[in-house]
Image (cartoon, rainbow, N blue to C red):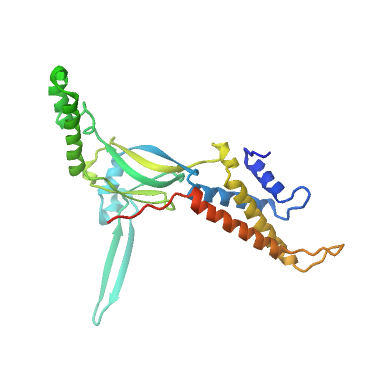
Amino acid sequence: MAQPSTRQELIDYCKRQLGYPVLEINVADEQIDDLVDDAIQFFQERHFDGVYETYYKYKITQSDIDRGRTRGGSNTAVGIATTTASVTIAGDSSATTFTFEENSNYLQVPPNIIGVTKLFHFDGTNTVTNNMFSVRYQMFLNDIYYWGATEMLTYAMTKTYLEDINFLLTTDKQIRFNKRQDRLYLDLDWGSVNADDYLIIQCHSTLDPNDYARVWNDSFIKPYLTALIKRQWGMNMMKFTGVKLPGGVELNGRQMYDDAEKDLEKIMEKMSNTYELPPFDMIG
């Protein structure tokens, strides 16, 4: 099919682009499967269509709070694994040892999350009705009935002022994330959170081609995988360089490999210029 919708249809499409069934593609099925996985991984990590922005909701438990607040050797009491590193410096008469500990203040996130943008904390103070000591609650309690004499402009300006106060007094939660760890570290005051509060994680998740079949027909994946298979074909055939077949035909795996490298170079340049989001400037 010219528009593959499954993994096998994509493989068959790439083989036809290389001359199959007129030519025999000297690449093992296991090698092609590996190349398909590599192409999908590259597509998910570099192509702007390989991910989508989403929000994950997580309910904080008392165990999370205990892990976040625990320090030092007391971690053993609650069964928490803490990374410890020691550095010993030898002196003239004695040795000095410095011990460093890393707390387990992280959440284990699904492997499909490759980037975390922001963290939102909802605990009732952000709502109108849950916290009677909230400024918003008091404003609605005393002013909501007075709509006839309250102008919408005044109300909007008051809400803007409250948001400014909240922005200045409530700093963003500091987070650290690496997609190879599958861990979201939360550098926040664990004494300020309660069990059953919610964390909303703004993140980017990969597109699973098994769930979204149109990934197999992506205009980048098809030529990219074709070039990968062609390079593997040339690599397999390089050991036969100089061997002549009946009729005087001579195999040239090196030329095929070099042509595939040129194709990949053009595809990668197009990826950087067309499909990849530019890095944001760092200010400050």
Does residue 224 appear to the left or right of 189 in the view shown?
right
Q: How many marks?
A: 0
Most distant residue in the right direction: 247
Does residue 101 appear to the left or right of 38 in the view shown?
left
Residue sitting nearer the eye, 137 or 88 = 137
Residue sitting nearer the eye, 178 or 250 = 250
Q: Residue at x 32, y 61 (%)?
A: 84
Q: Residue at x 49, y 52 (%)?
A: 273
Does residue 268 appear to the left or right of 71 in the view shown?
right
- Where, quadrant-wise, is the N terminus in this rendering? top right
Residue 192: quarter of image? top left
Most distant residue in the bottom direction: 92
Determine whether 196 is above or below 266 in the image.
above
Determine whether 133 is above or below 114 in the image.
above
Q: Residue at x 54, y 55 (%)?
A: 268
**Residue 9: where, in percent of width, then height?**
66, 41
**Residue 92: where, in percent of width, then height?**
25, 82
Residue 62: quarter of image? top left
**Residue 135: where, in percent of width, then height?**
15, 31
Does residue 180 appear to the left or right of 190 in the view shown?
right
- Where, quadrant-wise, is the C terminus in this rendering? bottom left
